[in-house]
Image (spheres, helix red, strand yellow):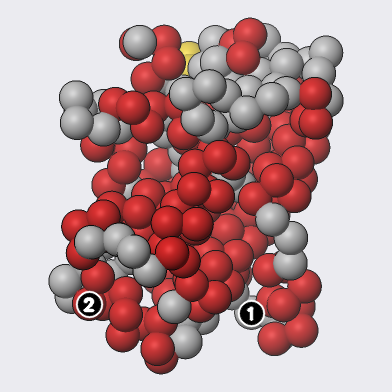
Amino acid sequence: MLLIATDGLAWGQKGHDVTCAVAEKHLTKRAKRHIKKVLEGKSIVYWANWLDNASHTPEYEYTLTWHYKNINADQTYDEVPPFETGDIVVAINEQISKLKSGTLSHEEEALALKMLIHFLGDIHQPMHLGRKTDLGGNQVNVFFFKKETNLHSVWDTDLLESGHAWSHTEWVNQIDRLNRKERKAIAQGSADDWARETHQYAKIVYEDTPEGTKISYDYIAKYTPLIEQQLLKGGIRLAHILNEIY
């Protein structure tokens, strides 16, 4: 269980805050009103990281495997069946279906919404479409400058914070500059499409970051644009889903 639990975090707090802040900027007025009611006045940014902590409690430990989908080096994305305990793609589709049903109690709707906003961040973090053999990069030991760490942690937080030491609002101001046509193009597709896309980035990261890699300024410069892109995509797609639901 401890090994599974280490695989559950994505983007760190800042990344999830950025994803939800981007989404909030593009919600329709109707969606904003409904979400405010469901979350009892709090924003989706407020709840962006809630599930990372909740998944480690007895009440919600059933969601531990819902944060990722493992695809080993010798597998293609389409060769991996859904996890029996649920995975990131199954979890996103289930929350969308529940929220669209209109049959949930207030508490059930709030829970599904809190989960959905978190999973849309997770599905855009490359290591959450990483390999089962190394727990999504958790067992790939690397050095971030002089700090001994692992590949998953680097992609959770270290790269993001080193690329730009911004608040989540500054992130949004800087990266969310696409026009309506560009945002519409990004919003197309399904959870499967987005997971498949993220998996392609994961393969590149693995190839570029073998065991023992010493990560420095050149690596940060190379991958900061990808992090910017993935946070922006996550936010735009989350807004699209929520606007469609509400």
Is residue 215 rendered to the left or right of residue 45? right
Q: Find residue 120 and report its horizontal and vertical position in percent.
A: 52, 52
Residue 51 image-quadrant placement: top left
Name the N-terminal-most of marks 1 and 2.
2
Kindly identify the amino acid type of the residue bearing the numbered disc 2.
Answer: Lys
Q: Local crowd at mark 1 within 10 Å, few (<14), some, or many (≥20)?
A: few
Instruction: Report which quarter residue 236 is drawn in.
Output: bottom right
> What amino acid type is highlighted by mark number 1?
Arg
Question: In this figure, what is the number of numbered marks?
Answer: 2
Residue appearing at x 75%, y 41% in the figure: 196
Front residue of 98/77: it is 98
- Against 85, residue 244 (above or below) is below
Q: Specify the quadrant that holds the N terminus.
A: top left
Residue extending farthest front: 103
Q: CA distance from mark 1 to mark 2?
A: 29 Å
The residue pinned by badge 2 equals: 37
Q: Position of residue 191 (x, y in %)?
A: 65, 50
Residue 173 in view in this figure: no
Q: Which residue is mark 1?
A: 177
